[in-house]
Amino acid sequence: MTTFLILTALLVLVELLVGVRFLRHDRPSAPPPSHLDWSAGLLPSRPYASQL
């Protein structure tokens, strides 16, 4: 019984660590390609409304 509890506790701990790491690293590192990087000086030459 003690071995079962220790193995179950280890399994729960591993699942918790994997879940936390997944949630922390599930963010995109760069903006999507559809959004221009305005901080790099790539400003649009005219307003978006006039590009239709």
Image (spheres, helix red, strand yellow):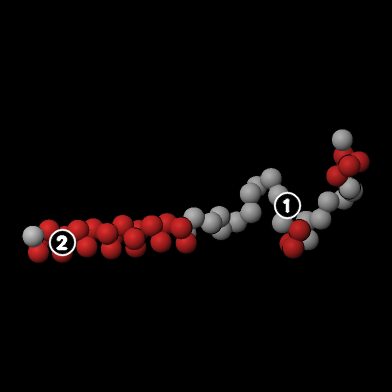
Q: Earlier in the sequence, mark 2 or mark 1?
A: 2
Residue 29 quadrant? bottom right
Q: Position of residue 25 (x, y in %)?
A: 47, 59
Q: Position of residue 42 (x, y in %)?
A: 78, 56
Q: Residues within 10 Å of mark 2 (few under 14, many from 20)?
A: few
For the N terminus, the image quarter is bottom left
Q: Residue furthest top?
A: 52
Determine whether, in the image, residue 19 is placed left or right of residue 35: left
Q: Amino acid at mark 1?
A: Leu
Residue located at (65% from left, 47% from top): 33
Element class at badge 2: helix
Q: Nearer the viewer, residue 46 or 16?
A: 16
Q: Nearer the viewer, residue 27 or 34?
A: 27
Q: Which residue is mark 1?
A: 36
Q: Nearer the viewer, residue 27 or 46?
A: 27
Q: Position of residue 22 (x, y in %)?
A: 42, 57
Determine whether, in the image, residue 48 is placed left or right of residue 32: right
Q: Residues within 10 Å of mark 1 (few under 14, many from 20)?
A: few
Element class at badge 1: loop
Q: Identify whether 11 is placed above or below 50.
A: below
Determine whether, in the image, residue 29 is placed left or right of residue 37: left
Q: Amino acid at mark 2?
A: Leu
Q: Which residue is mark 2?
A: 5
Determine whether, in the image, residue 30 is placed left or right of residue 40: left
Marking on residue 27: none
Does the residue at mark 2 contact the one at mark 1 (Cβ under 8 Å)? no
Residue located at (34% from left, 62% from top): 17
Residue located at (85% from left, 44% from top): 48
Q: How many marks?
A: 2
